[in-house]
């Protein structure tokens, strides 16, 4: 999925990847990214819990977070936790690209 995102976004962005929820939080806190793409299914700490922790951190709360999952029924929970956008897998590549560009103001 990470490789697909790289292709969809045309290599116009710098990427950092985390293999699990705790690593994603540590990486976000260290880098303070412009945008986060977050899968719901993460080892360690799930994506919704990671999102809640991101929103609770005043430095990271404003960062747009795109949530994706194979479980479309998670949409309400993702938005309730603070998702900026939600994509059920499989997603339309152009829609993902458009959402990222919109959230980054491009």
Image (spheres, helix red, strand yellow):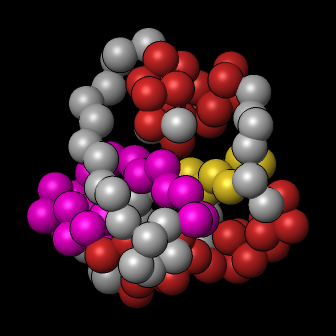
Which of the pair 23/102 is nearer the observer? 23
**Span colored in magenta:** 23-41
Residue 59 position in % (x across, y down) = 26, 73
Does 23 appear above or below 17?
A: below
For image coordinates 50% across by 56% down, the residue present is 38
Residue 36 position in % (x across, y down) = 42, 52
Q: Which residue is most to the right?
A: 73
Q: In the rendered image, is residue 83 in sight?
A: yes
For image coordinates 40% across by 59% down, the residue present is 63
Report whether 23 appears left or right of 77: left
Does 65 appear above or below 4?
A: below
Report whether 96 appears left or right of 60: right
Magenta run includes residue 10: no
Magenta run includes residue 35: yes
Which of the pair 55/49 is nearer the observer? 49
For image coordinates 67% across by 23% down, the residue present is 93
């Amino acid at each position: 999925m990470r490789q697909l995102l790289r292709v969809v976004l045309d290599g116009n962005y710098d990427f950092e990847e985390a293999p699990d929820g705790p690593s994603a939080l540590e990486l976000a806190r260290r880098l303070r990214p412009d945008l986060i793409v977050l899968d719901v299914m993460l080892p360690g700490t799930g994506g919704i819990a990671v999102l809640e922790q991101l929103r609770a951190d005043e430095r990271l709360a404003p960062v747009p977070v795109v949530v994706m999952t194979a479980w479309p029924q998670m949409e309400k929970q993702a938005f309730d936790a603070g998702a900026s956008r939600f994509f059920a897998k499989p997603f339309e590549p152009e829609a993902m690209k458009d959402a990222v560009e919109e959230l980054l103001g491009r």
